Amino acid sequence: MKTCERFERIKSGYERDITYLRNHSQRSAGTNAAKTSATNALAVRSRMAKALGRHFAACPICG
């Protein structure tokens, strides 16, 4: 599947946020902050999928 630079930029930004939230969750395991970070990581992953899907549908290079 060929994708454009914007697709990769969107994806890498979301992946960076997800990695940060997961690492925070692991560092502070057992706390309320860790649970919140883990939940937020799942929400960000869902938003990433929606954003990439919208981009893929609208982009002439990716679609």
Image (cartoon, rainbow, N blue to C red):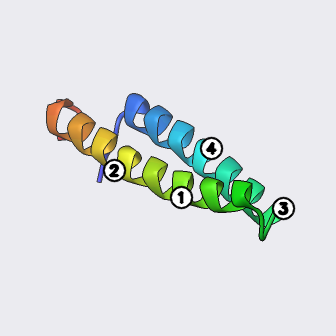
Badge nearest the viewer, 4 or 3:
3
> Crowding near pointer 3: few (<14 within 10 Å), some, many (20+)?
few
In this orientation, does residue 62 appear? no
> Crowding near pointer 2: few (<14 within 10 Å), some, many (20+)?
few
In this orientation, does residue 49 appear? yes
Residue at x 54% of width, y 51% of height: 40
As drawn, the label of residue 39 is: 1
> Crowding near pointer 4: few (<14 within 10 Å), some, many (20+)?
few
The residue pinned by badge 4 equals 16
Query: Callout 4: helix, strand or loop?
Result: helix
Q: Earlier in the sequence, mark 1 or mark 2?
A: 1
Badge nearest the viewer, 2 or 3:
3
Q: Earlier in the sequence, mark 1 or mark 4?
A: 4
Instruction: Check contact, mark 2 vs mark 3: CB within 8 A.
Output: no
- In the image, residue 30 sits, relative to residue 56, either above or below, namely below
Residue at x 76% of width, y 54% of height: 24
